[in-house]
Image (tube, rainbow, N blue to C red):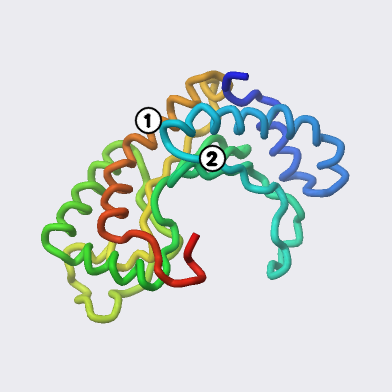
Amino acid sequence: MAFRGWSDEALEFFEGLEADNSKTYWQAHKDVYDEQVRRPMEELLAELEPQFGEGRVFRPYRDVRFSKDKSPYKTNIAATLGEGYVSLSADGLGAGCGMYQMAPDQLERFREAVAGEKTGGRIDAIVATARTKGMEVTAHDSLKSAPKGYPKDHPRIELLRMKGLITWKQWEPAEWLSTKKAKDRVVGFLEDSKPLMAWLQKNVGGSTMPEHRR
């Protein structure tokens, strides 16, 4: 079936799950998750895969082994789409693109490129353009000060402190979410993120460390 957005029931499902994150609630509303939450996500990925790459929906179960919070279920549905990421929760629709958390070898190449006059100037311009389009530019974590070997007053110190680099956009729930326009927003975001992703692929690339290889 063609993607037609997410219904109000999908958002209501997550609102209920936030209030009662239990196996009892999950089992009682599993059909709503399957039909109103997961199925539209799979339809969206299927339509976008030819343009943006393979899609994969994450499992709805939380890994609670090392967490104080033992809530068993995630309060969003998320999926990867090539180098992109799509998420739906009670707060609305979100999309991201880039390298959220870099491996040590990637981080070294990233900082060298950010510090470089030509490559650094290019990413500075890309970030500025992304922000004018309403995208957040962020990462998994950032250093509190300059990384070792770089001056604290470097003109691109904000980027040098980051341990990754992604674009992110969040849309609050509105009528468009239950229509095909939801797909248009994701597509527009991924298209606008292409310059940043191209810069990362050219200047950072994948990790050569065994535990980070795909």
Q: Position of residue 191 (x, y in %)?
A: 34, 34
Residue drawn at x 30%, y 54% is: 200
The numbered disc on residue 121 is none
Based on the displayed image, in which of its 4 quarters is residue 72 positioned? Answer: bottom right
Task: For mark 2, give the secondary structure.
Answer: strand
- Measured in 3D between alpha carbons, the distance from the residue under mark 2 to the one under mark 1, in whole angstroms, is 17 Å
Q: Position of residue 138 (x, y in %)?
A: 38, 54
Query: What residue is pinned by disc 2?
Result: 55
Residue type, mark 2 in image: Gly
For the N terminus, the image quarter is top right
Residue drawn at x 86%, y 36% is: 28
Local packing at callout 2 (Cα closer than 10 Å; few below 14, some 14-19, many 20+) is many
Which one is nearer the viewer's eye here, 170 or 110? 110
Residue drawn at x 50%, y 59% is: 214
Q: Position of residue 180 (x, y in %)?
A: 51, 19
Local packing at callout 1 (Cα closer than 10 Å; few below 14, some 14-19, many 20+) is few
Q: Relative to residue 8, is residue 201 drawn left or right?
A: left
In this rendering, the count of numbered labels is: 2
Disc nearest the viewer among 2 and 1 = 2
Q: Is residue 139 above or below residue 29?
A: below
Which one is nearer the viewer's eye here, 184 or 174? 184
Q: Relative to residue 113, is residue 21 drawn left or right?
A: right
Query: What residue is pinned by disc 1?
Result: 188
Residue drawn at x 75%, y 38% is: 16
Q: Is residue 198 above or below residue 156?
A: above
Which one is nearer the viewer's eye here, 155 or 27? 27
Q: Position of residue 204 (x, y in %)?
A: 30, 61
Indicate which disc, 2 or 1, sits on the residue closer to the N terminus: 2
In this view, which residue lies farthest toward the bottom? 148
The reply to whether discs 2 and 1 touch (Cβ–Cβ < 8 Å) is no
Residue type, mark 1 in image: Gly
